[in-house]
Amino acid sequence: MIHSADHWENVYRSKNFDAVSWYAPHLGDSLRLIEQLCPDKTAAIVDVGGGESTLVDDLLHRHYLDLSVLDISAAAIDFTKRRLGAKAQQVNWHVGDITRYNFGGKKFDLWHDRAVFHFLTDPAARQAYVELVRGSVKPGGYVLMATFGPNGPLQCSGLDVVRYDDAKLHHEFGDGFQLMGSELNDHHTPMDTDQQFLYCWCRVNH
Ligand SMILES: C[S@@+](CC[C@H](N)C(=O)[O-])C[C@H]1O[C@@H](n2cnc3c(N)ncnc32)[C@H](O)[C@@H]1O
């Protein structure tokens, strides 16, 4: 099996930013929900598996002051930094595998993940991810997840995925997470197809 980091590095080195199925000029649903859940601009927000998405640009534009982006692909992080230019200095950047990462004691008010968790087909990797969320999100903070929904694709980027409805996703996280809301949205891909996404948000109680 190809190692995950190599897979993603190869994707970002070989494809244009707007030629991947998950590309959208703006992550409108993510932005709307982040602003609803965290109207306070001093909130610490992390975008896990941010890739080359413009979410961080749009959050900076809305004057969020404490932003972090992590991705397993150094190429994706470099691309996003170059796009932001001098503004990149206002963001905390992390390159690593989220199933074995350590944010060094940093605690977040909101954890955002669009289209990363659904690649974790190994239950042990999902458990490690949830443990990291538990240790990295402040009590009363939020986890905002976007995965493929029940009618979403079975694969993405040539990799198998797990599809979720809100109950199934909440079950992965467990009792310390209070399910606050969910919605199903269609993402229109650059290949002119639609993909069903589940957005699901939980409050962290611990
Ligand atoms: C489908 S893309 C989504 C990118 C971005 N969130 C978006 O919505 O445009 C999945 C992203 O997750 C990253 N990724 C995959 N596995 C990861 C892991 N184990 N740890 C951290 N990032 C990972 C990939 O490099 C890629 O940028």
Image (spheres, rainbow, N blue to C red):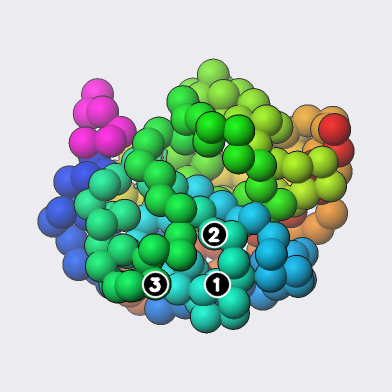
Callout 1 crowding tier (Cα within 10 Å): few <14, some 14–19, many ≥20: some
Can you name the residue that lies furthest to the left here? 14
* Residues packed near mark 3 inside 10 Å, few (<14), some (14 to 19) or many (20 plus): few
Q: Is 100 left or right of 2, judged from the image as shown?
A: right
Q: Amino acid at mark 3?
A: Lys
- State yes or no: discs 1 and 3 in contact (Cβ < 8 Å): no
Q: Is residue 90 left or right of residue 171?
A: left
**Residue that mark 3 sits on:** 87
Quadrant occupied by the C terminus: top right
Q: Which residues are magenta?
A: 1-6
- Residue 67: x and y in percent read 54, 59
Q: CA distance from mark 2 to mark 1?
A: 8 Å
Front residue of 89/188: it is: 89
**Residue 67, disc:** 2
- Say if disc 1 is inside 8 Å of ligand 1: no
Query: Assess mark 3: CB under 8 A from ligand 1?
Result: no
Q: Residues within 10 Å of mark 2 (few under 14, many from 20)?
A: many
Q: Are marks 3 and 2 in contact (CB under 8 Å)?
A: no
Visible residue check, residue 111: yes
Residue 154 pos. (x, y %) = 45, 46
